[in-house]
């Protein structure tokens, strides 16, 4: 009886193995046949922040042109690694490459900004007031110097709000992220103490507070803990209808983070290589904790015996992303590029060539 | 029907020998493959951590500052965090595991009651760790926070203690099922002999079963500890993720596995990545040392 059972099991297992082995190659063959006439399947990897927008863009692009784009949202660091080891057609990053990173890369790399994101400060206070936050207050909170919500500095910026005698409970990201980079980049610019003591990176040695994983971890912890304050992606805060503070920018205006004010943050002179930090922007109506996100491509696409068609397809895709693709940004709460940034992106994209021959 | 001649024919014997040889070779090959893969993993970890070993040396093990901005990487707080959460989890879970083992191995070895309990425990082992993490974050953390407020401790909610509690729950099934098995294997004639001498059930458990299965209990604890050392997701969600050596049992900290999971994807420079890989190698070595120590202790018993 037992032997029979084992026998049946063995037969079932055998059938399962045989059928899976035969059906999967068939499936992938069909897919290849479907995309091959257009000649291309592009592979990209990198930032997680623009992933929802990119996947929508690539889906639309596939519908209109038939080009299939496979984007792996493995994080900016991973995207840069994949690009420098030449295993992808394009990389994506929330932070531009530093001089050292550019030098370490095997060939010149071009930055193309695709859209903007912002970081907002969310908190858990009684009656959920809309706080006004000055750069000083933000830096002092995260340096651990402001320990009570009714601190004189917070009161001075919010005279109309009754602030409770509640301990400030700081929540930061525990995982390395572009959001942390953008936020610490801002703090470095507005506070010399932060700049010398902590610095900026995707992950830093926080002087105070607790770490939580991801936007959802930070917001979860803030929602649970009275007196908590944390920073999250604007999109995440909007989608989850969270209250966040308006921030005083360089021109002295308290600006609420919105698609419009984030796009406005990029209304500054943008350098030709598009490697610019927008935090603490000069734009008078811009939200000060905003940042571009970039697509990264090799300037000379003729490497590792790539076909010219593939290089052309990659540049065409990015061209589409910074033009037609931009209208997909707002419905998903991403801030589209302002005209000036779009011009720089165009110029950078046009500089990409294939062994000296222009591709666009 | 096979006849005797058929079975002893040279052809048949040859075939038998061949299949025997193939089977043995297959066994050896798979066993060696496992060992080779393990060594290869360790070598990969060591080779990839060379840049960090070169630039940091022993500071990696002796300092407690972890600052990616200035490329200072000291793994001491995380080594400490891993050991303390795992040991605490072991201490919390072991009494429950032994109680469970005695109940199902000695009192109710058969029947519906024991079947239901055994299945539930196995189910506990099958729950993905992210679910433990979520449950911990949304149920356990608020409860612990209210108690912390009552006792006047800083009400973080998350921290070393919370993580250890969840870890204890996660590793319990491993030691419990092993302990149940060894307890149920205590020879019946020994127990009967004890009863015939007038021993009570408690005396049998205390003086006969527990000493008899002590090495089995220890093996179960070791298995559970191994699981606790490497647990990542649930701990990351509950430990508070600070880069300092925990100041109190209820304070936040971090573990090696959790730091790797948190920072690896977005680590931009070479030494940073390499330091994280070195931490992986360190975790590997720590697990190895604990296992070897454990085996020695089991032998002594």
Image (cartoon, coloured by chain):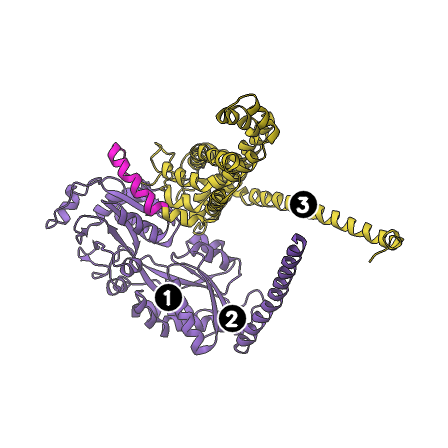
Could you tell me residue A310's position as x and y percent?
Answer: 52, 72
Q: Secondary structure at mark 1?
A: helix
Q: Which label sits on residue A41?
A: 2
Q: Any idea which chain is the purple one in this picture?
A: A
x, y percent for residue B213:
56, 30
Relative to the observer, which residue lies in front, A275 or B162?
Answer: B162
Look at the image and give the colour of chain B: yellow
A65 relative position to A263: left or right: right
Q: In the figure, B209 relative to A297: above or below?
A: above
Read off the chain for label 2.
Answer: A
Q: Nearer the viewer, mark 3 or mark 2?
A: 3
Q: Main secondary structure of the magenta part?
A: helix
Along the line of sight, which residue is nearer the eye, B292 or B97?
Answer: B97
For residue A53, which numbered disc appears in the image? 1
Residue A357 visible here: no
Q: CA distance from mark 3 to mark 2?
A: 41 Å
Whether A310 is among the magenta residues is no
Q: Badge 3, how many Cα within 10 Å: few under 14, some, many 20+?
A: few
| Residue B31 in the image: above or below residue B191 | below
At horizontal 56% and vertical 21% (from top left) the residue drawn is B197
Q: How far from the left and from the top, in percent, is residue B144?
A: 31, 39
Please report the bounds of the magenta region as a residue range.
Answer: B136-156
Quickly name the residue at label 3. Answer: B31
Q: Are marks 3 and 1 on the same chain?
A: no
Give neighbour class at mark 1: few <14, some 14-19, many 20+ (Cα, 10 Å). Answer: many
Q: Are marks 1 and 2 on the same chain?
A: yes
Residue B139: say if magenta. yes
Front position among marks 3 and 1:
3
């Amino acid at each position: 009886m037992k032997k029979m059972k084992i026998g049946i099991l063995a037969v079932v297992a055998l059938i399962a193995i045989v059928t899976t082995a035969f059906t999967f190659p068939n499936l992938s063959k069909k897919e290849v046949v479907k995309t091959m006439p257009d000649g291309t399947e592009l592979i990209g990897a990198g930032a997680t922040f623009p992933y929802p927008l990119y996947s929508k863009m690539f889906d639309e692009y596939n519908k209109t042109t038939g080009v299939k784009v496979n984007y792996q949202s493995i994080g900016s660091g991973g995207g840069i690694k994949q690009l420098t080891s030449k295993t992808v057609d394009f990389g994506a990053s929330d932070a531009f490459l530093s001089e050292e990173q550019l030098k370490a890369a095997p060939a010149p790399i071009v930055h193309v900004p695709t859209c903007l994101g912002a970081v907002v400060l969310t908190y858990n206070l009684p009656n959920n007031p809309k706080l006004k936050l000055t750069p000083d207050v933000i830096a002092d909170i995260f340096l651990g110097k402001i320990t009570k919500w009714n601190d004189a500095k917070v009161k001075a910026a919010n005279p109309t709000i009754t602030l409770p005698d509640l301990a400030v409970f700081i929540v930061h990201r525990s995982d390395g992220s572009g959001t942390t980079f953008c936020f610490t980049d801002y703090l470095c610019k507005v506070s010399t103490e932060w700049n010398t003591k902590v610095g900026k990176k995707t992950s830093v040695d926080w002087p105070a507070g607790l770490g939580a994983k991801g936007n959802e971890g930070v917001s979860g912890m803030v929602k649970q803990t009275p007196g908590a304050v944390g920073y999250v992606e604007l999109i995440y805060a909007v989608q989850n209808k969270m209250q966040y503070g308006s921030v005083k920018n360089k021109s002295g205006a308290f600006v609420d983070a919105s698609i419009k004010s984030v796009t406005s943050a990029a209304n500054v002179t943008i350098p030709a290589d598009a490697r610019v930090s927008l935090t603490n922007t000069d734009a008078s109506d811009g939200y000060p904790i905003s940042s571009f996100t970039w697509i990264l491509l090799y300037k000379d696409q003729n490497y590792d015996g790539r076909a010219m068609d593939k290089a052309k397809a990659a540049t065409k895709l990015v061209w589409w992303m910074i033009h037609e693709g931009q209208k997909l940004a707002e419905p998903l709460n991403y801030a589209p590029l302002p005209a000036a940034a779009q011009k720089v992106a165009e110029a950078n994209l046009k500089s990409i060539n294939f062994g000296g021959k222009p591709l666009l | 029907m096979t006849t005797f001649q058929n079975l002893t024919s040279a052809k048949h014997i040859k075939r038998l020998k061949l299949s025997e040889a193939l089977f043995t070779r297959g066994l050896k090959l798979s066993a060696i493959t496992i060992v080779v893969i393990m060594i290869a993993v360790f070598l990969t970890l060591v080779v990839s951590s060379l840049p960090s070993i070169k630039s940091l040396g022993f500071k990696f093990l002796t300092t407690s500052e972890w600052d990616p901005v200035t490329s200072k990487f000291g793994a001491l707080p995380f080594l400490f965090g891993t050991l303390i959460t795992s040991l605490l989890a072991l201490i919390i879970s072991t009494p429950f595991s032994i109680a469970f083992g005695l109940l199902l191995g000695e009192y109710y070895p058969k029947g519906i009651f024991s079947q239901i309990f055994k299945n539930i425990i196995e189910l506990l082992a099958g729950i993905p760790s992210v679910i433990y993490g979520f449950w911990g974050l949304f149920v356990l953390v608020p409860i612990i926070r209210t108690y912390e407020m009552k006792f006047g401790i800083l009400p973080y909610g998350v921290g070393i203690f919370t993580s250890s509690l969840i870890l204890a729950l996660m590793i319990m099934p491993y030691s419990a099922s092993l302990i149940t098995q060894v307890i149920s294997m205590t020879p019946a004639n020994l127990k009967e002999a004890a009863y015939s001498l007038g021993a009570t059930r408690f005396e049998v458990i205390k003086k006969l079963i527990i000493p008899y299965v002590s090495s089995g209990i220890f093996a179960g604890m070791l298995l559970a500890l191994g699981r606790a050392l490497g647990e990542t997701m649930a701990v990351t969600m509950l430990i508070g993720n600070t880069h300092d050596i925990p100041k109190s049992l209820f304070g936040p900290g971090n573990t090696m596995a959790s730091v790797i999971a948190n920072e690896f994807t977005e680590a931009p420079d070479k030494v940073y990545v390499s330091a994280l890989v070195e931490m992986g190698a360190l975790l590997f070595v720590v697990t190895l040392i604990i296992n070897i120590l454990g085996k020695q202790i089991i032998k002594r018993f």
